C-alpha cells in the first residue's frame, strides 16, 4: 500500500468503515510507515477530542428566554387584541349594514346567512376537536 492510498483510508478506518482486508492492509502499512502512523495517531486523538465536546443547546434556551420576555409577551398580546377587537367590530358593523339594507333581495340575505352559519359551525367544530385533543397531544411541548 502506498502512502497516498493509506492517507485516504485512515479516516474510514477510524470510523470502522473499512472491510477487514482493507483494515488489515492499512494496519500493515501503519506498522512500517512513520508518517502515516503519525497521521493516524493525530486523527485518532482529534476524533477522541471531538467526541468529548458538548454543545449547549443555545437555540432552545434563547427561544425560551424570548418567550418569557415581557416585551415579547406584551407585543404578542397587544398585537392580537389590536387585530381581533377592530376585526370583530368591523365584521359586526358589516353584518348590521348588510341585513339592515333594504335594497338587497331576501334570497341573497338568506344565502349569505347560511354561508356565515356554515363557517361558524365549521369553526366551532374545529375548535372543539382542537381542545379535546390538546391534552393528549404528545407533541405539544415540541419546540419548532
Ligand atoms: Zn505511509
Image (cartoon, rainbow, N blue to C red):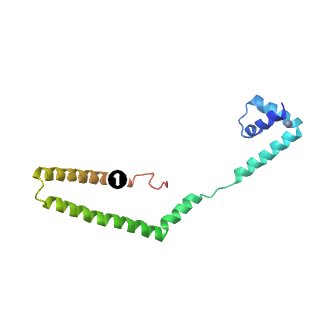
Where 110 falls versus 64 (above or below)?
above
Which quadrant of the figure has residue 35? top right
Nearer to the camera, 84 or 54: 84
Residue 5 in the image, given as x and y percentages of width and height: 80, 33
Dot 1: element: helix
Count of all numbered marks drawn on residues in the image: 1
In the image, 91: left or right of 33?
left
Nearer to the camera, 3 or 138: 3
Where 93 falls versus 36 (above or below)?
below
Which residue is at 17% across, 62% downward?
97
Which quadrant of the figure has residue 88? bottom left
Farthest residue, direction front: 103
Which residue is at 42% across, 65% downward?
76
According to the picture, the residue beneath numbered tag 1 turns out to be 130
Nearer to the camera, 74 or 92: 92
Does mark 1's beta carbon lie closer than 8 Å to ligand 1? Answer: no
Where 13 falls versus 91 (above or below)?
above
Which residue is at 55% across, 62% downward?
62
In the image, 14: left or right of 93?
right
In the image, 79: left or right of 45?
left
Which residue is at 32% across, 51% downward?
129
How many residues crowd around disc 1 within 10 Å: few (fewer than 14), some, or many (20 or more)? few
Nearer to the camera, 55 or 97: 97
Q: Quadrant of the N terminus?
A: top right
Which quadrant of the figure has residue 26? top right
Residue 17 in the image, given as x and y percentages of width and height: 71, 35
Where 57 falls versus 11 (above or below)?
below
Ligand 1 located in image quadrant = top right
Residue 63 in the image, given as x and y percentages of width and height: 52, 61
In the image, 134: left or right of 50?
left
Amino acid at each position: 500500500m502506498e502512502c497516498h492510498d493509506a492517507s485516504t483510508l485512515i479516516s474510514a478506518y477510524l470510523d470502522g468503515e473499512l472491510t477487514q482486508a482493507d483494515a488489515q492492509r492499512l494496519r500493515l502499512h501503519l506498522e512500517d510507515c512513520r508518517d502515516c502512523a503519525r497521521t493516524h495517531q493525530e486523527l485518532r486523538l482529534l476524533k477522541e477530542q471531538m467526541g468529548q465536546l458538548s454543545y449547549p443547546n443555545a437555540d432552545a434556551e434563547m427561544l425560551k428566554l424570548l418567550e418569557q420576555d415581557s416585551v415579547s409577551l406584551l407585543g404578542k398580546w397587544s398585537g392580537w387584541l389590536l387585530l381581533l377587537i377592530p376585526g370583530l367590530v368591523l365584521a359586526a358593523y358589516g353584518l348590521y349594514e348588510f341585513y339592515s339594507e333594504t335594497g338587497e333581495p331576501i334570497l341573497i340575505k338568506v344565502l349569505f346567512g347560511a354561508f356565515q352559519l356554515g363557517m361558524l359551525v365549521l369553526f366551532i367544530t374545529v375548535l372543539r376537536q382542537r381542545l379535546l385533543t390538546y391534552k393528549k397531544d404528545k407533541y405539544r411541548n415540541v419546540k419548532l
